């Protein structure tokens, strides 16, 4: 019964057209698939393809990312990543190469877990290269007994060294829940704000992440 309710919720999230969800603003739907393999007690390898759709449900962005996550201590981890990105432009698909590195601090408290991720990205496209810094602070609340759901909230800002300013921000709210022994999912709402010259432009995003642990 619980699994049926979860599958119904996921079907609704995937099926509802974005124009109905956000009739008066920009809306997008993102979804990713994460496969993880525990190499040992400290190292985890992950492969994450992701697809993004605009409010007409047209795919405009795709990437595949490879992670190596090294858990140095219980409270700190270091991740080396590479993201291969295709973005749809007027003249075709633009390719971007994006190696990046994360430093993550984790603090487990009685009723919630706090984490802070600092990321440095090297963005290479059209033979140009630039650096960007991202910082994401997340809070995952204790499990709600019904359906084993973990609510979470997060905030992330983007500092672009090419323009020397913060020009993007994301606020996240969602739930994480299991779908079986090795499967899980995260359903999220994201408010993304982008700096366009003087004004900030908001985009409402519905995202579904599906996870699979190979071990």
Image: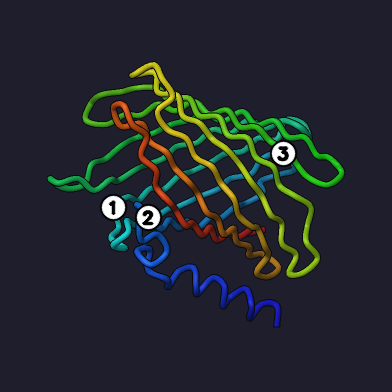
Nearer the N terminus, badge 2 or badge 1? 2
10 Å crowding of disc 2: few (<14), some (14-19), many (20+): many
The quadrant of the picture occupied by the C terminus is bottom right
C-alpha span from label 2 to label 1: 13 Å
- Residue at the (55%, 61%) spot, across then down: 210
Q: Image quadrant of residue 24?
A: bottom left
Residue at horizontal 40 percent and vertical 59 percent from the top = 22
Which label sits in the foreground, 1 or 3? 1
Q: Is residue 145 above or below residue 116?
A: below
List the residue tagged with mark 2: 27
The residue singled out by tag 3 in the image is 42
| Residue drawn where x is 40% and y is 26% of the image | 122
| Kind of element beneath mark 2 | strand
Residue positioned most to the front = 24
Compared to residue 50, the image places residue 127 above or below, namely above
Q: Position of residue 164 (x, y in %)?
A: 39, 16
- Marking on residue 60: 1
Q: Quadrant of residue 34?
A: bottom right
Element type at mark 3: loop
Q: Earlier along the polypeptide chain: callout 3 or callout 2?
A: 2
- Checking the image for residue 196, the label placed there is none
> Where, quadrant-wise, is the N terminus in this rendering?
bottom right
The x, y position of residue 27, in whole percent, is: 37, 55
Number of residues whose C-alpha sits closer than 10 Å to that of mark 1, classed few (under 14), some (14–19) or many (20 or more): some
- At a point 34% along the width and 64% down the height, the residue shown is 19
In this picture, is 75 found above or below 7? Answer: above
Query: Quick one: which residue is furthest to the left in this view?
Result: 91
Whichever of callouts 1 and 3 sits on the residue coming sooner in the sequence is: 3
């Amino acid at each position: 019964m619980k699994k049926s309710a979860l599958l119904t919720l996921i079907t609704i999230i995937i099926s509802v057209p974005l124009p109905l969800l956000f009739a008066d603003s920009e809306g997008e739907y993102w979804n990713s698939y994460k496969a993880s393999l525990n190499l040992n007690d400290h190292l985890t390898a992950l492969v994450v393809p992701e697809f993004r759709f605009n409010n007409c449900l047209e795919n405009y962005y795709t990437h595949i990312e490879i992670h190596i996550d090294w858990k140095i201590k219980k409270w700190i981890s270091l991740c080396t990543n590479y993201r291969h990105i295709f973005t749809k432009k007027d003249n075709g698909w633009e390719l971007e190469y994006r190696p990046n590195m994360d430093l993550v601090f984790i603090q487990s408290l009685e009723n919630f877990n706090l984490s802070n991720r600092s990321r440095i990205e090297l963005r290479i496209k059209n033979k140009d290269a630039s650096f960007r810094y991202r910082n994401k602070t997340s809070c995952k609340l204790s499990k709600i007994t019904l359906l084993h759901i973990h609510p979470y909230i997060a905030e992330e800002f983007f500092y672009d060294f090419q323009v020397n300013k913060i020009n993007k921000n994301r606020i996240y709210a969602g739930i994480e829940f299991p779908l079986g022994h090795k499967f899980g999912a995260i359903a999220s709402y994201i408010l993304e704000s982008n700096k366009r010259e003087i004004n900030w432009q908001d985009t409402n995003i519905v995202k579904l992440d599906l996870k699979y642990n190979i071990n």
